[in-house]
Amino acid sequence: MACVLQIGAGGVGGVVAHKMAMNRESFTRIVLASRTLDKCRAIADSIREKGLGEIEIDSVDADSVESVVALIEKYRPKLVVNVALPYQDLAIMEACLRTKTHYLDTANYEHPDSAHFEYKEQWAYDTRYKQAGIFALLGSGFDPGVTNVFCAYAQKHYFDEIHSIDILDCNAGDHGYAFATNFNPEINLREVSSKARYWIKDIDSKKVDSNVESNSLVSQADLALNPDLKQDTIYRKFEREEKHFTLDSNTQDLKVESYFNGQWRDIAPIALMKEWDYPEIGVKNSYLLYHEELESLIRNIKGLRKIRFFMTFGESYLTHMKVLENIGFLRIDEVAHKGGKIVPIEVLKTLLPDPASLASRTKGQTHIGCYMKGVKDGKERTIYIYNICNHEACYKEVNAQGVSYTTGVPAMIGAKLICEDKWGLNAPKGHSACTAILAESAKIAQSLTSSKLNRDFLDNPQTSSTILECQDSKKDSKLDSQKVDSTSCHSSEVSSLKSYNAERLKLNSDMPKGGEHQGIDSSSGSGVWNMEQNDPDPFMCELNKQGLPYVVCEIESNGSLKVLEDGRKLNCL
């Protein structure tokens, strides 16, 4: 069906290439490229040995826009799948823009010189991607990725409004070493050692009106806003007030910042935790972190008031990491060494085991899910959607451990949906994006006809049919066959959504230049989109087909779990 160019041949890249080779009806030509050709060759050999046919390999410098452009022009793929380092996202996005090629990645852009993660520099490409008529899908891994889709699926099928989301990431596997990371050590340790943050709105002023701080790393206000959490007692067992070097500012400068009608509230790294009871796994210590999907979900989930992210860590991992921090091995700045310069965390990456080498050693399971509270038909409810993945089964299938598998399979699924035109150009977007289309179309007609993008929107013959698709997608499946009165339906929708979307466009004013229309389908589905802004149903169906089946549970008032869907038992055609 399509030629796909994959850039990146690490642990995740191996999974993506294997899974694409297992879906030849969608990927007729697979090209794998990396700076290190030997890595590509090893993956191609494994695919061949498993009887999955041939893939092509090539070399590329993903830091160089010109190098990526030359590679794209050589193969002319429909889509570039970026599973290289997150530092390289912008170079690859720029190359796709210049060649008018669709783009997909699994993690948002990360600044190489600071532990800072945000989507804004990628959202800034939205206008240019719309003008070029190409589609970019951001964050098609598991978290971000599947977690975003879980939230969109819950919003579509189980809630009228979702008020709170807790994203839970549990790796209950064991690789047998005293200390190692399950994916790129540099990325993993920068992420975990950075300050945590959560987002909240409609705050009870009584809980935050005091400036009195607690006698610990966490303010009284944040303790009051998170009464279900407690302070860590493991990570800071070896804490000292003074260090012989300066820590990166992103681990220390704790702020309260306004964002999308609410607040980001920063917490010191690994300072708050909770003992979550994971279905089919058990109780695990789970620590509040910041994770990139929070930034987009805040903008796209209706009714959201609070969102947090948690990841599990054992005492051994935390103790080793704290020692590494204390001696300076987590530093990301250059230091003088024997007449030259080194970056300590890069040296540490060299010393630690290659995550890909852990695959054959790792036993146990991963468990990742979204715990959501909200309202349906005026009644409060709690829904938990999760996936369980077995490390040993992953290795048997694609020579990878579960952490790589749970990132690589969703990347392949996103690519598959784009190649099959189920996501991307001319494909219906999710509920939030559709409501934005309706209000924006009315607003454009009244006052914004002067801009090029808006003229394109009004002149586009597919605009009216796209609006109707979005309206239809919100109706109960039993009514799908009924004809919609386009005039009356459009009028009532615009009337009821005008206020909401005016506020959404106002809030989009915090977007960087070029991102002002992100989430508004003003050019036949092109532009830069996050996972939850697309129709979740085809993606959820593919999860069941491709080895990551999901489970939907309702948490009843007595705390018991009622299984509503179990993808392990469903046939998804």
Image: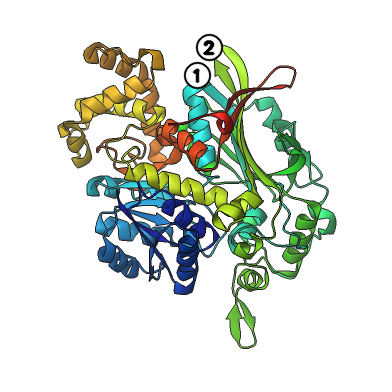
Judge the density around disc 1: few (<14), some (14-19), many (≥20) Cα neighbours within 10 Å: some
Task: Name the residue tied to disc 2.
Answer: 377
3D distance between C-alphas at marks 1 and 2: 7 Å
Q: Could you tell me if the residues under marks 1 and 2 are in contact, i.e. CB atoms within 8 Å?
A: yes
Image coords of residue 31 (percent x, y): 36, 62
360 sits to left or right of 443: right
Residue 327: x and y in percent read: 75, 69
Q: Is residue 450 visible?
A: no
For label 2, the crowd category at 10 Å Cα-Cα, with few meaning under 14, some 14 to 19 and many 20 or more, is few
Which residue sits at x=31%, y=67%? 71
Q: Give how far across and how far down residue 231 sits, in percent.
A: 79, 42
- Helix, strand or loop at disc 1? loop
Please identify the quarter of the rendering in which residue 404 is found. Answer: bottom right
Residue 305 is tagged as none
Residue hosting label 1: 160
Q: Secondary structure at mark 2?
A: loop
Query: Which sits in the foreground, 518 or 557?
Result: 557
Amino acid type, residue under disc 1 in the picture: Asp
